[in-house]
Amino acid sequence: MTQPSPSRRTMLRIALGVLPATALPLSLTVGSSTAQAGTRGTVRSQPSVPDAATVRPLGGVVSASCSPDGSQVCDGATSGPLEVLNGSYPLSVPGLGIPLGGIGAGSFMVNQCGTFGPWNFGGQRNGDRWENRILPQAAFHIREQVGKSAATVRTLATKGPHVVGSQGPVPDRSWGDPLSAWNVLSPGDGTYSALYPFGWIDYKPFKTDVSMRFYSPIIPREDRRTSLPVAHFDVSLSNPAQQTAKISVMFTMPNAPVTNGTTPASVRRGLYSHATTHKSTGITAVTLGADDPGNTPDAHRSEWTIAARAQAGQTVSYATSWNSDSDGADIYAPFSAAGTLGNSALDSSHSAGAIAVSVTLKPGQKTTIPFVLSWDFPQISFADDKTVWMRRYTNFYGARTTDTTNATAGNYNNYIAGSYPFEQSFTIARDALADRTRNLADIEAWWKPIATNRAYPRVLRTAALNQLYQLAFKMPLWEGGLVSNSVTPTQGTRVGGAIPGTHLFFAPDSATGGNVAMGTDVGSYAYLAYNLFFPSIERDRLRAFAEAIMLDPHGNPEDPRLDNPWITWGQSSAPAPEAQQFIDVPAKRIYRMYAYAHLNKDNAFLASVYPAMKRQMDYLQALVEPGENLPRSMKKSPSPYLPPMCNTYNVTPVVGRDVYNSGLYLLALATMIKAGKKRKESAVTVEAWENAFRLARTEFEDVFWDSKNRWYRYTEYTTGSAVHLDTFFAQHMAERLGLPDLVDLRRYQEQLTRHYHLFMAHRDSSGRLLGASNMAIPDGTTEWPIQSTVFFVTKLRQEIQVWSGTNYLTASVYYNAGTRFGNRQLREHGVEMAAAATTQVWEVEANGFTFDTPEAWDRDDASRYAYPGYERPLAIWDALDAIQPLNPFLTGRSGR
């Protein structure tokens, strides 16, 4: 009998995981996702790995693409100062993995080779890009002896990638190997799975089943555990053999600096090490520290602790010191011989330590060995160590700050000298092991309902949860008090000191693109993720912006600078039409402040920031030309090489007014009207805003609606027309916040319905959609109304780029509109758009985007990309929230 052909809609829903494959005729049933995502299916000893996890063969790091049209650093060329003009730099890096460490605590990845790296502990030594290195001495090791057979000893990691292009080595895509005396695994000897905050490795070359789960206790709406410098490693062992198995697991760790070979150099001398046994809990630990008066602030009285908690039938042994500069044979010898260590030092270097746990398993028995790695590097510094902060986690281990009882107004949140005892890594490790069961339960309580919820397509679950990696790995400053500062603040006082209990958070963008904290520009696309997961971070960052707005002479300060965040930042100039760049930022700050108050029901916060919101509104209204009702951004760039940067799409040319900034101006007015009424603003002021909103809304339709092409044109082109993917960013925010509609609803629906195909017309060489491009022109045309350039280089056109975060945000626009208007096709288009970007990031290994999501790639070629590390991709959470609200999973927790 002839089988019926499935519809495109059915195929799409099956591919995205919305429908089971059994919805297809039997002869057309398909397997799992793309083969390039790694081998999916049964993972031995890992029943808890969800289908949404990113799965790769251990050590099977693919060769990444190197576009001949982009930077040739990927082929071994030397990096130059203008590398950004060629795109594709910083390089994408295949093989990255789950980061371990709390937000703001500093972190490292357990990469797809099973080694520890890259690293990012932030501050002036890391800058705004992580350090591509591993610790060759850090590893887990197994000694297995089944029955009377000879023992097998293996190190649970593979050698790293060593990439060499036609022009030489490619260090940015390479990292080192475990120590040479160790018997490492071969590529494919295990399966690596990742779904943040969890990672799993299932190891194959043993007669027993050996697997490991690793994670840090990331708990939404709780500052304490989320900020901790701790990593759990649960090693699971089971014996399916018919003979008794004797198994030992060893964890080795060096007494390492958190940066290596950086400028300025980190100084960490005065090494020490010791063991601690906590009898009441069964915890045994080895602590590795450094204490010397000449150490730099980032290394001052810093420590590592490795620890294990013996379960029934398990025994623990340790070595307090072995030579980290050797080939590793000294620590491997006793472990290989007996599976135990001598409970003493092997040398006097204090440069590395080890802890081992041994167990005997009868046939059919299984056990789990809980290990922990903790660290205490409590300080982070900037400006050649002239500014020093405590990290957030220290506040839960003794560090106190000035408040209303010991500080004058405006001088709050400074660290009280001597309040933190330092050398707390063992205490942190002890607490983590004692709390392991609760930590795991509390993570799974929020994570599982998202990770396994089939209301969300599988690829979107992958993207949303794994994208949270950057909160821990890319954002190393979440402060717990200002220790010292000898740099003159931009406005005479640092921000963050006006309200007790404020803890500042710094989110630098990638190593190109301005080196600033894009908290209120690019980062505005992440607003929902912060409000859902970590609202205290969102609140405190906005508090600081409110302070800076009130300090700034014209009320529109730039984001804090990379070299000394929250101490120095750029000042604004007097607002005037056609004189200011990035005029989207004031409107974004206004809606972000209201959004926090609205979503978290925090009227006190709204009261505190309302004066800053009014000042930003005044600034925006000063950008409106007399006789008009919408703002005009900079007309002539101050640089002969760059266009005026009108908004976040900074290279896209603007003539007169543009739809993106104008929509945000409408959003700002609508927000101020609502906020003003809540704050009992004068009737005269509210009426003025309402009148401005009515006039601006009418002018918006008159200026931008293109009746011929049936879309809102991006800008006031003199000839031709083009439509922008992100036209309805502001409309989406208005809908999310319960504000009035900003655009004509019939035109809104018509643009979405008629022109989807123009944005989604491009596929890669394997036939996968590449995502939606930023702009489109009418069918049958090939010439853009205006050609954008940077330094006269036309190949960097943002119009033809796919921005992952914009795709996610616009996907939620489509889905919400489909729900609102009862249009199923719009909902499906939203899912398809988000899934296309997700597939390129999380499933196409050769792109090298996994755990290093770029801002953009070309609509014709994903190997031409730019700006890994921006916050915009966190907009994936808007897409999930559109499909099914996330509040029940993430709200109602204990908070701080």
Image (spheres, rainbow, N blue to C red):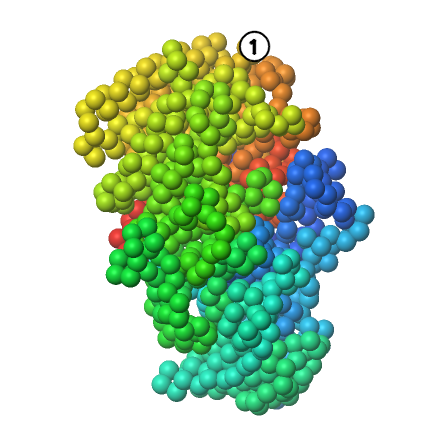
User: Taking 54 as reference, is 322 left or right?
Assistant: right
Q: Position of residue 861 (x, y in %)?
A: 65, 35
Q: Position of residue 578 (x, y in %)?
A: 49, 20
| Residue in view at x 23 percent, y 24 percent | 686
Quarter where residue 295 is shown: bottom right
- Badge 1 marks a residue whose secondary structure is loop
Image quadrant holding the C terminus, namely: bottom left
| Residue in view at x 40 percent, y 67 percent | 417
Q: Nearer the viewer, residue 792 or 876?
A: 792
| Residue in view at x 64 percent, y 46 percent | 90
Q: Can the viewer see residue 369?
A: no
Instruction: Check disc 1 and report the residue beneath it.
Output: 719
Depicted 790 relative to depicted 384: above or below: above
| Residue in view at x 43 percent, y 51 percent | 505
Depicted 453 relative to depicted 882: above or below: below
Q: Residues within 10 Å of mark 1 (few under 14, many from 20)?
A: few
User: Taking 787 as reference, is 358 left or right?
Assistant: left
Q: Nearer the viewer, residue 239 or 709?
A: 709
Q: Position of residue 29 (x, y in %)?
A: 52, 44
Q: Nearer the viewer, residue 257 or 869?
A: 257
